[in-house]
Amino acid sequence: MFEDIEEGYERRDIYNQESVEILAESYLNLIKVAKEDPNREGLLKTPVRAAKAFQFLTHGYGLNPEEILKSAIFHENSKQIVVVKDIEIYSLCEHHLLPFFGKAHIGYIPNGKICGLSK
């Protein structure tokens, strides 16, 4: 496990080794189909790097949103709109598996509870 702390962000690179091996084999095949030499110096570790990148980009897919948000729900009697802007999002396009990123903006009127999305 690799850890570093930068500007209050704790980074943990933890990978499922079995998945890395399966994905790396698939990326190796992609390299071969592209008529590249997988033994070329610049490509030697690419299948494993790509496999880890794919796991990183999809790590949130297995998370339960209720578990993540349960400590961020607060009782609030206000009926005014709550708006949270510029939430950074990163994901993969489901049609091409290509990465994309952007910013989300959420607005809602509380019904006795608010979600602390700003944290």
Image (cartoon, rainbow, N blue to C red):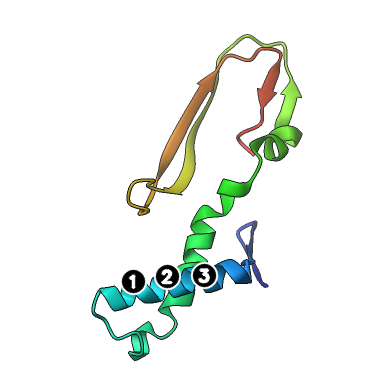
Above or below residue 83? Residue 36 is below
Left/right of residue 94 with respect to residue 63 in the rendered view: left
Drawn side of residue 111 relative to residue 35, left or right: right
Q: Nearer the viewer, residue 57 or 27?
A: 27
Which disc, if any, is residue 53?
Answer: none
Residue shown at 55% from the left, 70% from the top: 20
Task: Give how far across and how far down residue 50 sits, in percent.
Answer: 44, 70
The numbered mark, 3 or 1, whose residue comes first in the sequence reads 3
Asked which secondary structure carries label 2, the reply is helix
Place of residue 90 in the rendered image (x, y in percent of width and height, measured from the top left): 45, 48
Residue 30, numbered label: 1
Q: Is residue 32 visible?
A: yes
Q: Which residue is mark 3?
A: 22
Say whether marks 3 and 2 touch (CB < 8 Å): yes
Residue flagged by tag 3: what amino acid is it?
Ile
The alpha-carbon separation of the residues under discs 3 and 2 comes to 6 Å
Residue located at (71% from left, 13% from top): 112
Instruction: Judge the density around disc 3: few (<14), some (14-19), many (≥20) Cα neighbours within 10 Å.
Output: few
Which dot marks residue 26?
2
For image coordinates 70% across by 19% down, the residue present is 113
Amino acid type at circle 1 is: Leu
